[in-house]
Image (cartoon, coloured by chain):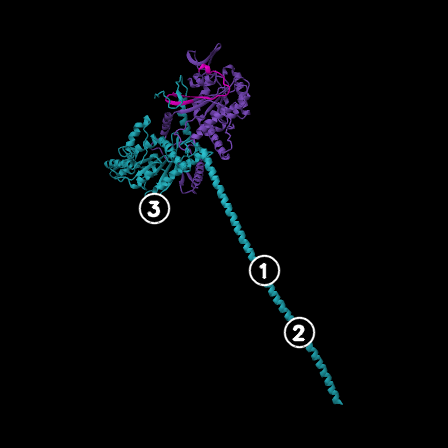
Amino acid sequence: MQLAFCHTFFKLLNHQIQRLWRLKYPLLGPEVSTSFYGNMADVGKTPVARNEKTNSEFGYVGIDAILEQMRRKAMKQGFEFNIMVVGQSGLGKSTLMNTLFKSKVSRRSLMTSEEERIPKTIEIKSISHDIEEKGVRMKLTVIDTPGFGDQINNENCWQPIMKFINVQYEQYLQEEINIERKKRIPDSRVHCCIYFIPPTGHCLRPIDIEFMRHLSKVVNIVPVIAKADTLTLEERDFFKQKIREDLRANEIDIYPQKEFDEDAEDRIINEKIREMIPFAVVGSDQEYQVNGKRLLGRKTRWGTVEVENTAHCEFAYLRDLLIRTHMQNIKDITSSIHYEMYRVRRLNENNTQPNGQQAIHANGVPEHEVLSHEM
Amino acid sequence: MVWLQSSQWEGARAVPLSGHVGFDSMPDQLVNKSVNHGFCFNILCVGETGLGKSTLMDTLFNTKFEGEPTQHNQPGVQLKSNTYELQESNVRLKLTVVNTVGFGDQINKEDSYKSIVEFIDTQFEAYLQEELKIKRTLHSYHDTRIHACLYFIAPTGHSLKSLDLVTMKKLDSKVNIIPIVAKSDAISKSELAKFKIKITSELVSNGVQIYQFPTDDETVAEINSTMNGHLPFAVVGSTEEVKIGNKMVRARQYPWGTVQVENENHCDFVKLREMLIRVNMEDLREQTHTRHYELYRRCKLEEMGFKDTDPDSKPFSLQETYEAKRNEFMGELQKKEEEMRQMFVQRVKEKEAELKEAEKELHEKFDRLKKLHQDEKKKLEDKKKSLDDELNSFKQKKTAAELLQAQTQQAGSSSTLKKDKERKK
């Protein structure tokens, strides 16, 4: 078939070109390196790479104007970010979300007091907000999971959450394989999942390990120690060490994952982050007067815990990681790794199972088990 | 820039922020990622041989790309593509320049556009294949789809050639076409204005959709709409430098004067560079991906038999269609297999029958030969017997003859003795 021929031909070409790009072209200074990959009809010709040090200095071409063009396009389109919070009730999840995004984005803020009860099963509630800062618009979706870890029997508590995440991947996949598809596929995939660890000070509990073990395979997990103002600094360091050991022992890969470090620079930055994980955070949406300044904090009789003071807690590091430096990276890993893995699994599923057999979802949950969840 | 509070996304409510969160760095994060990755841009130059396509590319990108001018005796239109890696400050650009070799040189030009359309389609196909793969690497895929097509119009001063019209009509739904008047130093200013008007009216009356610079973004709307009015750009390309005043500028020197490439009064080169590279490169790439590629993809998938909705307009998933097609295909395969098996069995039978025939024949032959042999043997035996008989009878006769001779000799000798005795008496 002609398709197959073209496919293999370009595979060959691609392979050749990729081989060439591995020859490191020096990137400093004006330089032109050429590679001739020939005519469409010449399949057998091998490409020739030459480094030509030509003088491109007699005039400015303007290629770097593309950065400005990209920026303009990004500002116009806006960004989307979906963040999920998981943890037992009472750990300060909603407060932390409000603190992170400096506005009332949590579910609590929208609820009336009658709804304040612990649900009997895990519910998944997602709320979207449109926020804007200095011309940059973002659609922020906060996905809350009330009821997680609150039952007496918490077996398989991770299942409804896993199912929700996979449903988002499925939606995206369906839209992507449509014949007539939208210009911009709406991205509802969960980019980041913040897992709240209660500040016991000892080590991870079985429910924590189970949850993180299952979910780290499908989503970027960022564990945080909640309500860290109940731990002293020594207790905090000890707790963190134990947690890191537990994570290593159970082979749980949390964000930033070691294997996705792109180059040495990335690795250095990410190692620093990995040494600090899990972040010990304190959340607050109330301001107090400290040293003449109004700061976010928690006021107690023995002092005020300043949320954004890095000597007090690590909220600032978490915020910088999630929003100011690694947000794009988090989205990239979700779309190019987690989503691709889901896609591969899903497409292979269809190949090996003929019609009639009951399909098992990629999350291991049989199709007929439908757990209730609200969106 | 103040944005209205109404949300541009459905289902999201606008929420005011009470402090600095920090996601305004997102465009920077995005740009940084792209810078690390590098950009790619692919230009296709379509035009007759000798219109200065290669020179214009050299002039646009300020480098000397390799290659000698092509001959005029090509049998058909071929496309030669070259990839270069350029860098300016921290931006790396993978530029691919595709040239049409031999365009307009043949006597019969009916099929000239075909190889160009095929080339563009092949690039789309490659991307589609990569997108449909199960294990794919889209983010590191080297995009070879043509982002811009510079169509070089010969500076006749009259109107578009029919070859140009036909080619552009075939290409306008597949690629962003930017028509330019090549070697425009051959036309005078007044002729050029008339030429441009003629060209644009011909394009419009023939329904050719050339690329319009986008006017929806406020920052560039004004300059883009002005430039839209200057299409097609009249360009002059040159890589030679000439001293004008106390500067070295790129120009073409004639006995009657010097045409400066970067002088806006002399030609539209600066406008072309501005539009193509400095203002709309990203938009060209986006249009290629969201309009031309999507159209190709849609047509291709529909051709292969995939649909989005069945007659009851219930959404069909690609998986289901794929399953159905796959089953159909497997069924066909099985049928073919059966057929082949039948044919094979039949052939075997035939061969067997043939072999049996042959065997039978052999047997018969063998029998016949055997019989012949036996006959011969018998004959020989008979002969032998008869000879033996003869020999025997001969021997008998011989012995009988000898006996007789012996007897007669005896009788003779006895008779001679008798005779002697008688004499003596």
Q: Name the residue under label 1.
A: B367
Please provide percent x and percent y for residue A159. Answer: 51, 24
Give the spatial CA distance, label 3 vs label 1: 75 Å
- Specify the amino acid type for callout 2: Ser
- The residue nearer to you, when weighing A41 against B333, is B333
Badges 2 and 3: C-beta atoms under 8 Å apart? Answer: no
Q: Name the residue under label 2.
A: B393
Give the chain coloured purple: A
Asked whether the residues under marks 2 and 3 belong to the same chain, the reply is: yes
Q: What stretch is highlighted in magenta?
A: A112-140
Local secondary structure at mark 1: helix
Badges 1 and 2: C-beta atoms under 8 Å apart? Answer: no
Neighbourhood count class around disc 3 (C-alpha, 10 Å): few under 14, some 14–19, many 20 upward: few
- The residue nearer to you, when weighing B397 against B72, is B397
The numbered dot on residue B404 is: none
Please provide percent x and percent y for residue B286. Answer: 37, 31
- Specify the amino acid type for callout 3: Asn
Q: Name the residue under label 3.
A: B73
Disc 2: host chain: B
A115 falls in the magenta region? yes
Regarding residue B100, the answer to whether it shows in the image is yes
Local secondary structure at mark 3: loop
Q: Chain B is drawn in which colour?
A: cyan
> Residue sitting at 28 percent across and 30 percent down?
B226
Disc 3: host chain: B
Single out the residue that lies furthest toward the top: A301
Position of the C terminus of chain B by quadrant:
bottom right
- The residue nearer to you, when weighing B139 against B37, is B139
In this image, A45 relative to B217: left or right? right
User: Is B24 situated above or below B410?
Assistant: above
Q: Mark 2 or 3 closer to N-term?
A: 3
